[in-house]
Amino acid sequence: MGGSQSSTTEQPKKAPEPPATMNMSGINEKTFIMVKPDGVQRGIAGEIMARFEKKGFTSCGAKLVHASKSFAEQHYIDLAKKPFYGGLTTFLSSGPVFAMCWKGKGVVKTGRKMLGTTNPKDSAPGTIRGDYSIDIGRNICHGSDSVESAENELNLWFPEGIIDGFAPSRLQHVYEN
Ligand code: DAT
Ligand code: MG
């Protein structure tokens, strides 16, 4: 073989760069998603992680944590005046939870939609709560309700920090040019 003809079977030496026009705006938004003790006990933590992965979001941290009662109280401090606060925080500290950080465009709002409404009796089928839970006090998962609370919750649950600089090569197939 010679000349300037290139073979059609030749592989590119380097993965193609994402197009310069790729819309990267907002792709670093982060949320805190947690599989509560009921979800871990029932063995569906992996399923919930898989839903966020398949959607296209990027994992920035994940770990099992057995929180103390006072840590659970801190997490739900905004609900301190609610009559269910005691039961809620006792339950949250009753066994390990699976704490996760997810990153991507619109992840806070979309994450909440993926969880479904707070009370599973109203959660749409196809949502996590709609598919896997019945009672409000055993609704499987938690998701931050705003970018600001995500930041506070991530600081609380991941004081060691998260993996932030990681941009998987698949992003060019997740986001539109
Ligand atoms: P969410 O988890 O959808 O953000 P929330 O922040 O209002 O909902 O409440 C936190 C958790 O407290 C919720 O996931 C389940 C529990 N909870 C909420 N309202 C309740 C109620 N009326 N009775 C018992 N538990 C409740
Ligand atoms: Mg909430």
Image (cartoon, rainbow, N blue to C red):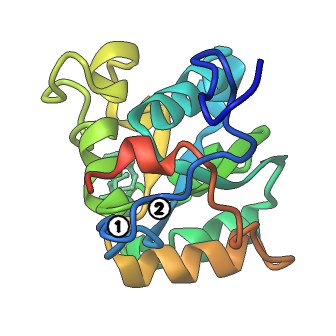
Horizontally, is 147 left or right of 10 in the view? left
Q: Going 79% across and 40% down the picture, which residue do you hit?
A: 96
- Whether residue 88 is visible to the viewer of this picture, yes or no, is yes
- Whether residue 87 is visible to the viewer of this picture, yes or no, is no
Q: Going 27% across and 43% down the picture, which residue do you hit?
A: 118
Q: Going 40% across and 85% down the picture, which residue do you hit?
A: 148
Query: Residue 142's x, y, as percent?
Result: 47, 49
- Note whether ligand 1 is within 8 Å of mark 1: yes
Q: Amino acid at mark 1?
A: Lys
CA distance separating discs 1 and 2: 5 Å
Q: Going 60% across and 40% down the picture, which residue do you hit?
A: 36
Query: Residue 51's x, y, as percent?
Result: 46, 28
Horizontally, is 83 left or right of 32 in the view? left
Residue that carries the numbered disc 1 in the rendered image: 82
Q: In the image as oriented, which residue stretches furthest toward the front?
A: 3
Image marks 1 and 2: residues in contact by CB distance under 8 Å: yes
| Disc assigned to residue 85 | 2
User: Which part of the image, by quadrant, shows the C terminus?
Assistant: bottom left
Q: Quadrant of residue 125?
A: top left
Horizontally, is 6 left or right of 139 in the view? right
Query: Residue 94's x, y, as percent?
Result: 74, 41
Q: Closer to the camera, 8 or 145? A: 8
Q: Amino acid at mark 2?
A: Tyr
Q: Quadrant of residue 72?
A: bottom right
Query: Residue 172's x, y, as percent?
Result: 44, 49
- The kind of secondary structure element at disc 1 is loop
How busy is the neighbourhood of tag 1: few (under 14 within 10 Å), some, or many (20 plus)?
A: few
Relative height, residue 160 to residue 35 (above, below): below
Horizontally, is 27 left or right of 145 in the view? right
How busy is the neighbourhood of tag 2: few (under 14 within 10 Å), some, or many (20 plus)?
A: some
Relative height, residue 104 to residue 131 (above, below): below
